[in-house]
Amino acid sequence: MAWAEQCGDNTWRVRYRRGDNSIGSIPGFPTEQAAQDHIDDMKSDQRKGTWLDPVGGQTTLGEFLPDFWAAIDVDLRTEENYRSIVRKHIEPRWGDTAFADFKNLKIQAWAKELRIHLSPVTVQGITKLLSLILSDAVDEKLIAANPIRPPRRGRRRHGQRPKKKVWAEPVELLEVADQIAACYGPSGAILEVTAGWTGARWGELTGLQRHNVHLFDDDTGFIVIDPDTGTLHESASGKLWLGPPKTEASARTISLVPFNVRLLRIQLATHKHPHVFIGPDGGLLRRSNFARRAQRPAADGNLHVDNPRIRLHPAKPGLTFHGTRHSHKTWMIDDGIPEIAQALRLGHVMPDKVQETYSHVAAAVEARLLQHLQERWEKAVINAPVDIDSNWRVAA
């Protein structure tokens, strides 16, 4: 229900009753007929189900955020990342802006300013989060449509090509592991080669528990990435917890190479913690700590450091822990392992029909895969440098 009402000598407004029985007002019409025309448009939009109360559009982004945070359903690490982006970039610029005042060109100009100091990928993540918030405002009928549209014109950006992922040959990875053993300890070295020869992710190995490791007397075995607790997650605030792996396909069983069975047997005998891999202090491993204390000095060397406890030469500059997973993938490609076998070992998603086909040849392919990996280890041991103590791997 709506009606026109004079509110000044030459001004009219439209009054309307909301669903909660309160009265809304839209001022600024010069004549009664102009107000009546707006009422007719309102009635038409209401019949179509497209009419929005203009008061909703005056809600600011800052006023809307508490409802947004209360409703968003993502894991803790993602939510903390979202909150950080909003606090640092979105709220300072748009917190006091009413949803009705968001315009695509203003947003694109803001994104252009951000790219002066931030990488294109970072800016893309910021604008995608703003778009998510605006889409939720649309769902709540505060605005009719999300104003963000992709840029339609502008100079072509010739940014740097993404750097190729650094991967390592087996002998290079073994040299990195030897240097990790020297500067961090044997446990870190076993973690590194386990990653390289299984293709498991950081969180899958640091979250690996004893009851999911199966080692047999004939030096065969496997590890299980549990679908509910198979990954150690770490939030931006430093909280650690066990949860599901990255994807549904990531919950899997990974067969072990004989030498890795022997190393894991040694590793499990060094402590009684429920987790297989733990830090020097006996607690759970943190990615940043391991990278700083083990991965970076072992891969990059520490020639730039004055008087280190142990001098390390570059073994494979730029190799990250995740790079061991790329290494494993590269080795399987080089050994001619079928793509579906690679996907199943790495926990990648493949069409069900292909998985069904693979199930008929799984045993033969798996045996060949493990044989190639064992041979790669043996050749790496023969060719590895001898200037770093390698006692941690003698039993393997």
Image (cartoon, helix red, strand yellow):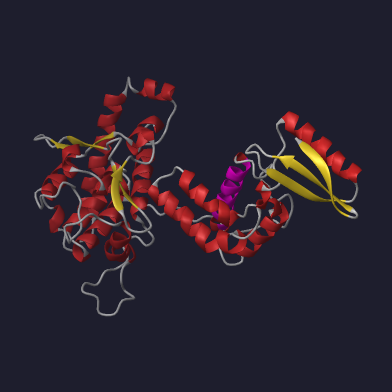
Q: Is residue 72 above or below residue 157?
A: above
x and y percentages locating residue 170 in the rendered image: 29, 50
Rendering quarter of residue 9: bottom right
Residue extent of the magenta highlight: 123-138
Query: Which residue, as the protein is rendered here, is positioned at the far bottom?
Result: 306
**Is residue 136 inside the magenta stretch?**
yes
Q: Residue, x 37% and y 62% (percent of image)?
A: 317
Q: Residue, x 65% and y 39% (percent of image)?
A: 21
Closer to us: 249 or 134:
134
**In the shown orientation, is residue 326 left or right of residue 374?**
right
Closer to us: 8 or 84:
8
Q: Residue, x 29% and y 37% (percent of image)?
A: 228
Q: Residue, x 24% and y 72% (percent of image)?
A: 311
Rendering quarter of residue 363: top left
Rendering quarter of residue 374: top left
Q: Is residue 339 above or below residue 7?
A: above
Is residue 74 in sight in this rendering? yes
Total numbered labels: 0
**In the shown orientation, is residue 193 left or right of residue 250?**
left
x and y percentages locating residue 208 in the rendered image: 23, 44
**Is residue 195 inside the magenta stretch?**
no
Helix, strand or loop: magenta stretch = helix
Instruction: State the quadrant of the N terminus.
Output: top right
x and y percentages locating residue 326 in the rendered image: 38, 47
Is residue 335 in sight in this rendering? no
